[in-house]
Image (tube, rainbow, N blue to C red):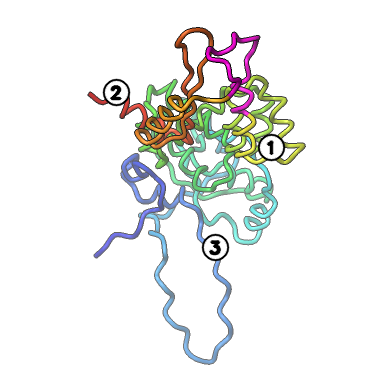
């Protein structure tokens, strides 16, 4: 018998984290409720098998007051919950909440996955909620919280970045290890963490959805990212627009540079153009070679689209 398919994008996987498919049911997105079948005079057909594995055993039911928000919760904002609250009022909680016992506090449980559902249950005035209780450490709790929120795709890029940083700082995980656990590429993890280098005001714009993660990445390293971010919002600039403008700003001199030897303004010699072409053919990247300062001092600029291209360049330059 073939095993039921696991949810995609789990990296190391929930079963590898906890060895229990029951936990996967609490974390994977809930299936959409099917519409009731039209009335028919024929005998009812046998119900189809569930598309996801059922829990190994029925979850417990606990008073909602015995649950508390998780310390390792990566999400900092809970918005647009009206639809979920209405669903909980009508159908109850279709997925149990994953919790762990709170040390030293009898009958107290900390939420690992499902805090959004717990908040919706409170607003729906439920008195009890289904739970799955597991004992686990902080690292597994943070990883599972990230996995659950990333599957729902509405976790902000800043909250995602903060989760990755906590895994690196508190649990000494490398970006490669994080990428395998979460099910994202290493360049994605690296690019996301770099968003935390932006000013707090720009990070707030990302949280509110005023800026996309792609737009924000183009602001990293520009002289005044906050001014450029506001310009992006006001002028509706795309990530590509910001990449171009950011490149221009980064290349502008801070002071008066000595003129390049050979005169001729910005025109390039045939030898310089030939060198650019050789570099482009060797690396597969757009190259710009400029003479700067005095003598033979030169500036070589390579246009690198993402970290995958950067890894390729580093590999070729360091190959022995």
Per the image, the residue denoted by label 1 is: 208
State the SS at label 1. Answer: helix
Earlier-in-chain disc, 3 versus 1: 3
Q: Given contact means CB atoms under 8 Å apart, are the residues at marks 3 and 1 in contact?
A: no
Earlier-in-chain disc, 1 versus 2: 1
Along the horizontal axis of the image, is 78 left or right of 53?
right
Per the image, the residue denoted by label 2 is: 318
Where residue 304 sits in the image (x, y, percent)? 47, 32
Query: Residue 294 versus residue 250: which sits nearer the camera?
Result: 294
Q: CA distance from mark 2 to mark 3?
A: 51 Å
The label on residue 32 is 3
State the SS at label 2. Answer: helix
Q: Given contact means CB atoms under 8 Å apart, are the residues at marks 1 and 2 in contact?
A: no
Pick the quarter of the image with the C terminus. top left
Identify the magenta region. 246-266
Query: Residue 101 versus residue 49: which sits nearer the camera?
Result: 49
> Label 1 neighbourhood size at 10 Å, few (<14), some (14-19), many (20+)?
few
Query: Against 128, is 193 above or below?
Result: above
Q: Nearer the viewer, mark 1 or mark 2?
A: 2
State the SS at label 3. Answer: loop
């Amino acid at each position: 018998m073939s095993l039921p398919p696991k949810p995609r994008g789990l990296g190391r996987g929930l079963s590898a984290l906890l060895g229990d498919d029951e936990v996967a049911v609490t974390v994977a997105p809930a299936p959409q409720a099917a519409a009731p079948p039209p009335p028919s005079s024929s005998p009812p057909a046998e119900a189809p098998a569930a598309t996801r594995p059922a829990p190994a055993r029925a979850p417990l039911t606990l008073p909602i007051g015995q649950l508390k928000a998780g310390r390792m919760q990566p999400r900092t904002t809970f918005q647009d919950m009206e639809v979920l609250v209405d669903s909980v009022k009508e159908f109850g909680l279709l997925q149990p909440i994953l919790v762990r016992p709170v040390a030293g506090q009898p009958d107290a449980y900390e939420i690992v996955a499902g805090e959004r559902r717990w908040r919706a249950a409170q607003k729906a005035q439920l008195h009890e909620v289904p739970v799955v209780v597991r004992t686990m450490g902080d690292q597994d709790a943070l990883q599972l919280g990230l996995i659950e929120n990333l599957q729902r795709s509405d976790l902000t890029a800043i909250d995602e970045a903060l989760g990755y940083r906590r895994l690196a700082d508190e649990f000494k995980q490398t970006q490669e290890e994080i990428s395998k656990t979460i099910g994202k590429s290493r360049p994605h993890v690296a690019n996301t963490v770099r968003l935390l280098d932006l000013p707090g005001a720009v990070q707030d714009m990302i949280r509110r959805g005023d800026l996309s993660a792609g737009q924000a990445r183009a602001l990293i390293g520009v002289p005044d990212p906050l001014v450029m971010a506001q310009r992006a919002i006001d002028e509706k600039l795309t990530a590509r627009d910001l990449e171009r403008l950011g490149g221009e700003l980064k290349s502008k001199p801070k002071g008066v540079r000595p003129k390049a030897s050979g005169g001729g303004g910005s025109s390039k010699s045939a030898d310089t153009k030939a060198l650019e072409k050789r570099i482009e053919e060797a690396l597969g990247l757009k190259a710009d070679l400029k003479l700067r300062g005095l003598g033979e001092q030169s500036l070589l600029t390579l246009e690198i689209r993402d970290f995958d291209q950067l890894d390729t360049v580093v590999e070729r330059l360091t190959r022995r």
